[in-house]
Amino acid sequence: MRIADICTRHVVHIGATASLREAAETMRTRHVGTVVVVDQPNGERVPIGIVTDRDLVVAVVAEGVDPGSLTVADVMSRRVATCMEDQDMFEAIEIMRERGVRRLPVLNAKGGLAGIVAADDIFGALGECMRDLGRALTRAQAHEMEART
C-alpha cells in the first residue's frame, strides 16, 4: 500500500518565525498535536522542521519559559524525517523505526509537502489488511465446504 493512499492531505503547517504561542493556538484550534514548519523557496511548502505538543511542554512549559518570547525555530526539530508519497507503507515504517518518530511529513515529487502520515494511519491500514485477509480465509473455507458437498 502506498503512503499516498493512507496519508492525511490537509497538513497543519506554520512558518519558522511564528511565535510558539501562535503554534500552540494553531494546534488547539485545528485539533492537532503536530505542526510542520515550512519554508516556501519556490512556491512549494518545503518542510524544514516539526513541532509537537510534547516539544512545547518539555522545552517551554517545563522550563518556565514564556511561549510568546520564542519562535517556532527556537524549539522545532530540524532533522525532519520524511517520506515520499509514492513509497510503500513498509518503507515508511522503516523510516519511523530508524529515526524514532511517529509522524512523517509526506513529500511530492518536487519535494513539497503533500501530506503527513502517522503511526495511527499505518495501524489503521494494517488493520484493514488483516480484516481483508480474514475475509479471504473465511471465503476459502466456505468454497471448500461447498465443493465437498
Image (tube, grey):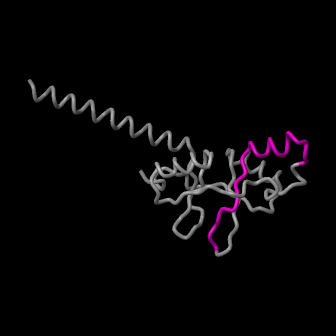
Query: Quadrant location of the C terminus?
Result: top left
**Residue 64 vertical placement versus 47 (above, below):** above
Which percent across, then down, holds residue 141?
21, 28
Which percent across, then down, holds residue 36?
68, 56
Magenta stretch, residue numbers:
43-66
- Residue 49 lies left or right of residue 89; in this view the side is right
- Residue 11 lies left or right of residue 128; in this view the side is right
- Residue 94 lies left or right of residue 80; in this view the side is left
Quarter assignment of residue 40:
bottom right
Whether residue 52 appears in magenta in the rendering, the answer is yes
- Residue 6 lies left or right of residue 25; in this view the side is left
Q: Residue at x 64, y 73 (%)?
A: 43
Residue at the farthest left position: 149
Residue at the farthest bottom position: 42
Quarter assignment of residue 110:
bottom right
Q: Residue at x 46, y 60 (%)?
A: 86
Return the residue nearer the eye: 95 or 10.
95
Q: Residue at x 69, y 44 (%)?
A: 33
**Residue 113 vertical placement versus 24 (above, below):** below
**Residue 55 vertical placement versus 11 (above, below):** above
Quarter assignment of residue 72:
bottom right
Which percent across, then down, holds residue 136?
28, 36
Whether residue 57 appears in magenta in the rendering, the answer is yes
Q: How many marks?
A: 0
Return the residue nearer the eye: 12 or 130.
130
**Residue 93 vertical placement versus 9 (above, below):** above
Which percent across, then down, holds residue 148?
9, 25
Q: Residue at x 73, y 51 (%)?
A: 51
Residue at the farthest front position: 98
